[in-house]
Image: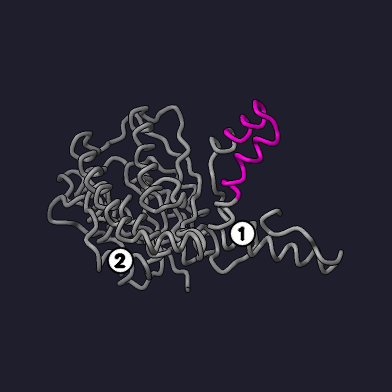
Amino acid sequence: MSFSPCIVIPCYNHGAAIGGMVERLSSYGLIIFIVDDGSDTATATALQTLAAREPLVRLFRMPENRGKGAAVMHGLRAAQAAGFSHALQIDADGQHDSADVARFLAAGQSCPVAVICGQPVYDESVPKGRLYGRYLTHVWVWIETLSFAIGDSLCGFRLYPLTTAIPLIDRVTISRRMSFDIEILVRLVWLGVPVQNLSTRVTYPKDGVSHFDLFRDNLRITVTHTKLVLGMLLRLPRLFARRLFGGDPGTAGNVDSTHWATFAERGSAWGLGLVATAYRLLGRRIALWVLLPVVTYFFLTGRRARRASRNYLQRLASHAGPMRRSPLRH
């Protein structure tokens, strides 16, 4: 797959922040598609002035406010029509670190079939209610995909491969509002598109403009999760078979690589803590019994890891003779 990226920015009443963001992004020399989602007159005027001044900017205006998802989808379609292979979505509110654009592009060029998804690293400016509320969505997304492939489904800083994103949004009705970011990622993982999570700094400017409506958007997100859980149940046999026989859905990295260093980490800190606590309180023998079903699960659901283990043992055997330890023991 060729790699020809551009930038897509959905914008709704962010006239004060968009100029500085475009100035920072222009240093990368990429075409910038700005989709004005029916902003007020002041923002619309600022965007028109910006487009006239900046040769890299391509401005589109929606006749009315249709939602962030609708604006992003409009930008993705415009990017593909212009001949680009990938689109880097970044929100217009100034929360994301534009210095990380180079990292997203490098990751996309290294694995062009993957969606590169930002995983926020917050500072003290983050509202605690927003921070804790995200974890509920994380849990539902892990359930909906039967995997931990998606590190953060709400981050509006991500790189899409258009050859998979466009057919999806053309075929399926996806939320046009804030829950778009969640739904498109889950559906891409359902399709088997690999996800690579990149940590990125996120700040909440004191004068920042947020359009998140606590009641309406949380209600929409709840409806989206309900729809996705039902969709997961319909796909359950296929997703479970993929876990058992075809590796993890949405595994990060180069899907053609068998080197262990390209595999995404699986499991969690609390799981490691549970085994460590069992070892400390109950001793080694009990800890091994606690660990046995865990090891068995990862062995059965990790086809690529089993293959890497087998290759390693075969290389050892070529130097030291036949190895008596099985890949499961290894």
Across and down, in percent, residue 330 comes to 71, 54
Q: Three-letter amino acid code at disc 1? A: Ala
Compared with residue 201, is residue 280 higher up or lower down, i.e. above or below? above
Note whether 281 is above or below 159 in the view shown.
above
Q: Dot 2: within a 10 Å radius of its alpha carbon, few (fewer than 14), some, or many (20 or more) residues?
A: some
Report helix, strand or loop for mark 2: helix
- The residue shown at (34%, 64%) is 165
Quarter of image, res 274:
top right
Tell me the SS state at disc 1.
helix
Stretch in magenta: 274-295
Residue projecting furthest to the left: 63
> Nearer the viewer's eye, disc 2 or disc 1?
1
Q: Is residue 87 magenta?
A: no
Kind of residue indicated by mark 2: Leu
137 left or right of 325 in image: left
Task: Depth check: give the residue in front, 109 or 197.
Answer: 197
In the rendering, at what x and y percent does residue 233 appear? 31, 56
**Percent of width and height locating residue 104:** 49, 55
Residue at label 1? 305
User: In terms of sequence position, does the residue under pointer 2 or pointer 1 come before the other?
Assistant: 2
Residue 78 location (% of width, % of height)? 28, 66
**Residue at which label 2 appears:** 168
